[in-house]
């Protein structure tokens, strides 16, 4: 690992899935895993390609039940390019000895470079050098250049390049009992001797896919179309020490794309007009340079290198091209098939970073949710509620995609899945609406789509809350919180928990913000909204009441994760660590033993402490004051300590949240958790899960930890608020941001000073608020602020 290069040396079959995920290339429209082109899908390799928003629904027979699942589709594989000495065996790292093998992900240019030297025996060596791009300037193009050099011999090399439509979704072992055959009507053909095509469609969603490839070679190119694939064949005359080059350029379209009549025609036309590899690389690198200038963080050392890798993968999944698409935030990126490519609440950890660099992308991701608002309202009505109930897992059309069953790999048993009761996803959407509007100043979105979503989410919470005469407060029952380990009370016949603190407090926040927004709307727009939704004064009065009287349970002087949490048994943590070592997935361990985590005070990830992640200390105290529940620093710190010792960190998001919270609550331990968040994917701390797709929320969250967490940066009330937290392990860092029409505002913190510069423009001055002063900076001005110790 160097500053701008992520490099793997040597060939390790056991590590290939992880490397393929981390070497994925994408452009926000589609992405391809970093598999070797000469290798096919097997237990070692998985060369998947995924188009953002391309889903298909299939029904499988699982444990005697018919189970329906929607998956992000593994589309035809454009990578295949294999080679052999004429008449000899095809060469792969699994079948031929290697002298050298190196994979290098070049972050600055967004390219994957591979160097391999095959030992052919008798002093003969074949050197293979490849460069791969998934084009960032034109989202429909990708290219692969392969240079072959003979060392110590002359001879002929056969090269075959294919488009393979015989792929399935088989990248996650625990899903292999499910039907993964999503592609049908695969047809292949030839446009010219250099250009071939392949088309197909998805089985139930009927998305048509068109792909075309152009092969450029020193030798004659011939074509064979057979068995769901098209193959181009060429023979290279190798001479000792001289490189021979084969370039493969592909174009990919689907029927979901705008401004086309047919995806196959678009693909053939585009690949025919595409320039050569060198020109494609130049334009690709230009766009990557622009992206880095806009979004890069300036952090020294290993942490900075990992953050750069995280940013690279965020930008490959959610680039400016995403602004033109109807897609959400896939929890595992476009890097694999884990979670079936579904959209969870991970946008809660992603959009705050994007808001300050690519607000147009944030807006598009929120529009994905708004387009599914009507479906969310239908789901709420089906549950007997008003307002909008957004799904915990979302895919193509906004229905609930959470599976009915999930497999415990330890026990081999299929178990009921109740995670659809995580209704707090609605609060996450509302939070992102608010944060986006505050950062971007997008009043049009705030007054229209944002207001509509916020109103319906608030309406759901007000209707879900039921008044308890004994408590004199409103309660929200039958839910599952962010923890996910607990989905029912011990021995209960029905799932769900009562008064999850995170759910109730964020519901109160949504109601409060919805009231503020409605009050601030221009009168004509407020009237339109009331007429369209039936909103009246009586309902607003209920919102006020509920937002001030939702119940927050406590026990032993700390906030309870949910009502009754303090009555659960204590887990013998040391015993389980001694017996199992890694107990991150404690739920699976206990179920395999015939026990259940529902009986214990044990959490998978931050739940109550998520409140300290979303809300700055002053805002969190204000929320509790509004609820007439005292929350002083001592109580909060006690709560942090309590859950710190009862969390197994079975999610990559957990270390991130704990690091963020501890940076303000107990600084000395913060860096340990920050490091865990940074290492989450590169070290595959979840034990093999990264090979199924990176954890996008955790990657974006680490970027936001530097951008907002350590700086205390908030955008609210028309100002930028800053309250930096000095961490000795990260004493200097900087970044640029985009704020309400200002491009390239620079912040740099070092040695107790904060430098801020605002580039010249015609935008109004920026109002900067620090705990002890207010500074107004006009475009073209800079300042250095001394920070308190």
Image (spheres, rainbow, N blue to C red):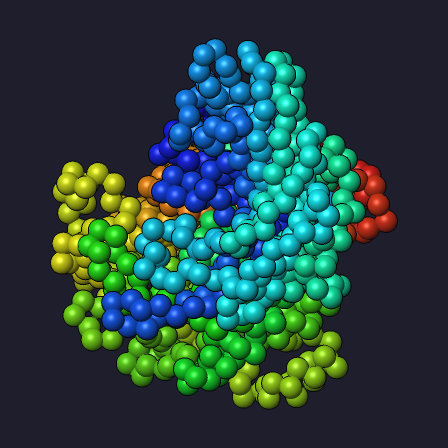
Comparing 21 with 75, the one in front is 75
Residue name at image x 32 percent, y 73 percent: 66
Comparing 113 with 638, the one in front is 113
Residue name at image x 46 percent, y 68 percent: 57
User: Residue 666 appears at what percent x and percent y?
Assistant: 39, 40
Q: How many marks?
A: 0
Q: Is residue 679 left or right of residue 486?
A: right
User: Residue 114 appears at what percent x and percent y?
Assistant: 55, 28
User: Residue 766 appears at what percent x and percent y?
Assistant: 74, 48
User: Residue 437 appears at what percent x and percent y?
Assistant: 66, 61
Rendered image quadrant of residue 396: bottom right
Comparing 418 with 572, the one in front is 418
Residue name at image x 51 percent, y 76 percent: 376
Comparing 134 with 634, the one in front is 134
Rendered image quadrant of residue 600: bottom left
- Relative vertical location of residue 297 with respect to residue 415 in this rendering, above or below: above
- Relative vertical location of residue 597 with respect to residue 235 in this rendering, above or below: below
Residue name at image x 38 percent, y 39 percent: 44
- Relative vertical location of residue 715 with respect to residue 462 in this rendering, above or below: above
Q: Is residue 48 visible?
A: yes
Q: Is residue 60 left or right of residue 732?
A: left
Rendered image quadrant of residue 717: bottom right
Residue furthest to the right in view is 762
């Amino acid at each position: 690992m160097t500053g701008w290069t992520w490099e793997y040396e040597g060939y390790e079959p056991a590590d290939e899935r992880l490397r393929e995920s981390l070497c994925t290339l994408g452009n926000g429209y589609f992405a391809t895993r970093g598999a070797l082109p000469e290798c096919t899908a097997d237990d070692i390799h998985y060369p998947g390609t995924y188009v953002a928003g391309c889903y298909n629904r299939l029904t499988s027979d699982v444990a005697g039940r018919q189970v329906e699942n929607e998956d992000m589709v593994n589309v035809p594989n454009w990578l295949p390019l294999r080679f052999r000495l004429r008449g000899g065996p095809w060469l792969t790292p699994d079948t031929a000895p290697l002298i050298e093998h190196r994979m290098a992900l070049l972050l600055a240019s967004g390219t994957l470079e591979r160097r391999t030297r095959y030992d052919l025996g008798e002093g003969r060596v074949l050197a293979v050098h490849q460069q791969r791009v998934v084009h960032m300037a034109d989202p429909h193009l990708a290219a692969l250049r392969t240079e072959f050099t003979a060392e110590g011999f002359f001879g002929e090399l056969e090269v075959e390049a294919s488009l393979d439509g015989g792929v399935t979704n088989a990248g996650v072992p625990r899903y292999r009992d499910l039907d993964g055959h999503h592609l049908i009507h695969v047809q292949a053909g030839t446009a010219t001797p250099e250009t071939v095509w392949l088309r197909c469609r998805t089985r139930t969603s009927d998305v048509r896919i068109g792909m075309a490839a152009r092969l450029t070679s020193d030798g004659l190119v011939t074509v064979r179309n057979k068995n769901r694939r098209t193959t181009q064949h060429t023979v290279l005359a190798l001479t000792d020490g001289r490189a021979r080059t084969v370039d493969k350029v592909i174009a990919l379209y689907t029927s979901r794309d705008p401004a086309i009549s047919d995806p196959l025609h678009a693909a053939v036309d585009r690949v025919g007009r595409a320039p050569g590899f060198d020109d494609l690389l130049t334009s690709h690198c230009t766009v990557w340079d622009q992206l880095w200038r806009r979004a890069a963080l300036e952090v020294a050392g290993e942490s900075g290198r990992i953050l750069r890798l995280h940013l690279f993968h965020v930008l490959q999944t959610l680039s400016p091209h995403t602004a033109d698409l109807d897609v959400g935030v896939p929890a595992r990126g476009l890097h694999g098939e884990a979670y079936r490519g579904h959209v969870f609440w991970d946008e809660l950890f992603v959009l705050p970073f994007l808001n300050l660099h690519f607000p147009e992308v944030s807006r598009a991701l929120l529009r994905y949710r708004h387009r599914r608002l009507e479906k969310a309202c239908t789901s709420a009505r089906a549950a007997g509620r008003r307002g909008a109930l957004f799904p915990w897992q979302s895919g193509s059309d906004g229905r609930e995609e959470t599976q009915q069953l999930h497999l415990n790999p330890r026990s081999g048993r299929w178990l009921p899945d109740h995670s659809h009761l995580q209704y707090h996803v609605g609060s996450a959407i509302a939070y992102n609406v608010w944060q986006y509007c505050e950062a971007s100043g997008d009043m049009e979105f705030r007054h229209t789509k944002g207001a509509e979503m916020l109103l319906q989410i608030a309406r759901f919470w007000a209707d879900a809350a039921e008044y308890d005469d004994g408590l004199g407060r409103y309660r929200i029952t039958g839910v599952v919180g962010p923890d996910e380990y607990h989905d029912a009370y011990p021995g209960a016949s029905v799932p769900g928990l009562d008064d999850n603190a995170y759910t109730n407090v964020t519901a109160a926040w949504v109601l409060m913000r919805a009231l503020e927004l409605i009050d601030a709307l221009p009168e004509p727009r407020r009237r339109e909204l009331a007429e369209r939704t039936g909103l009246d004064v009586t309902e607003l009065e209920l919102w006020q009441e509920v937002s001030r009287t939702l119940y927050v349970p406590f026990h032993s002087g700390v906030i309870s994760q949910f009502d009754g949490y303090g009555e659960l048994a204590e887990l013998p943590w040391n015993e389980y660590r001694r017996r199992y070592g890694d107990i991150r997935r404690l739920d699976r361990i206990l179920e395999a033993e015939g026990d259940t985590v529902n009986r214990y005070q044990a959490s998978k990830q931050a739940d109550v402490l998520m409140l300290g992640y979303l809300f700055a200390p002053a805002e969190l105290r204000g929320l509790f004051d509004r609820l007439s529940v005292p929350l002083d620093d001592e109580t909060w710190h006690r709560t942090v300590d309590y859950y710190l010792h009862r969390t197994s960190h079975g999610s990559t998001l957990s270390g991130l949240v704990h690091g963020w919270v501890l940076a303000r609550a107990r600084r000395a331990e913060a860096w340990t958790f920050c490091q865990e968040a940074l290492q989450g994917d590169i070290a595959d701390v979840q034990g093999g899960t990264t090979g199924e797709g990176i954890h996008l929320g955790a990657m974006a969250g680490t970027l936001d930890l530097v951008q907002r967490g350590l700086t205390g940066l908030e955008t609210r009330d028309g100002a930028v608020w800053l309250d930096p937290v000095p961490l000795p392990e990260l004493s200097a860092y900087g970044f640029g941001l985009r704020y309400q029409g200002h491009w390239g505002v620079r912040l740099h913190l070092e040695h107790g000073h904060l430098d801020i510069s605002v580039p010249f423009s015609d935008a109004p001055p920026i109002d900067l608020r620090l705990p002890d002063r207010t500074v107004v900076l006009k475009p073209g001005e800079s300042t250095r602020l001394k920070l308190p110790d």
